[in-house]
Amino acid sequence: MADVDRGLFKRARDGDRDAFWSLILPYRGLIYSVALGMLRNAEQAGDELHDVLLIAFRSVSNLRDPAKLPSWLYSITRNHIYDRTRREKRLRLAAQDAARRTGQVVAITEITEKEEWLTHMERATERLPEPFRVILGMKYMNDYSCREIADILDITVPAVKSRLFEARKVLRKNMEALASRDGGAASRSGGPASKERGAEP
C-alpha cells in the first residue's frame, strides 16, 4: 500500500473532515477484512466498518506517526470488536445468572416473541434512510451524546435531537407495518423506536 500522504494526515489530525475521509478511504478494505475475519458475517462486518470509521475520526488526533495508520486502524478494529463481544457476553451471563438466582423459567413462547421482535427491528432499521440509520447507530450502538453527534455531523444539538426524533418515528412506523403484515410482536417497546423526543444531551 502507498505511503500515507503526510500533508493529508496533518490536516486530518487538525480536524479537517474532508482530509480525514480522503486519508481513510484506502483502508476501508483493511478494516472490513479484519472485521469479516473475526465475525464471519458480512452484514456484521459492514456495521463494524462504520463504527470503526467513526472511532477513528474521533481519535485520529492522537496518532502521531502517519506510517502507523494501517496498524492503528487494525488495532482499533480488533479492540472494538473484542470490546463489543465481551460486553454482549457479560449481558448474556448476567441474564442467565439472574434467571438462576430467581429460579425464573422463561416460557418458550416468550423467547420466540423476543427473537421475532429483534428480527422485525433489524428489518425495520434496514428500511430507514441512511441518515436515520447513521444517527440511530451513533446514539444507541456507540452511546454518543447528542453533543458528540453534533460535532461529528457538523450540525447543531437541536438538529441532532430533531433527527433522532424523526428517525425513531419512522422506525416505529416500520415496526408497526411489519407487525401488521406478519402478525408478530414488532410493536413491542424497548428499543430506539420506543424512545421519546428530548434524548439526553
Image (cartoon, grey):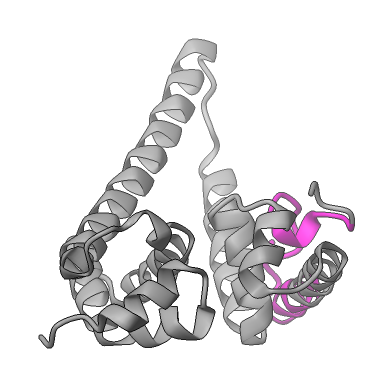
Q: Position of residue 38 (x, y in %)?
A: 19, 61
Residue 178 colored in magenta in the image: yes
What's the residue at 22%, 71% (across, down)? Answer: 36
Q: Nearer the viewer, residue 111 or 143?
A: 143
Q: Which of 132 and 106 is in front in this view?
A: 132
What's the residue at 27%, 47% (across, down)? Answer: 82
Q: Is residue 24 visible?
A: no
Q: What stretch is highlighted in magenta?
A: 172-197
Q: Where is residue 129 in the image (x, y as percent from the top left)?
A: 66, 87
Q: Is the N terminus in the top left, top right, bottom left or bottom right quadrant?
A: bottom left
* Image quadrant where residue 49 sits: bottom left
Q: Is residue 192 visible?
A: yes
Q: Position of residue 72 (x, y in %)?
A: 23, 60
* Image quadrant where residue 174 sits: bottom right
Q: Nearer the viewer, residue 138 or 43?
A: 138
Q: Which residue lies furthest to the left in this view?
A: 1
Establish if 201 lies above or below 186. Answer: above
* Image quadrant where residue 178 sits: bottom right
Number of numbered discs visible in the structure rendering? 0
Q: Which of 188 and 146 is in front in this view?
A: 146
Looking at the image, residue 152 sits to the left or right of residue 39; the answer is right
Q: Position of residue 172 (x, y in %)?
A: 78, 70
Establish if 200 lies above or below 72. Answer: above
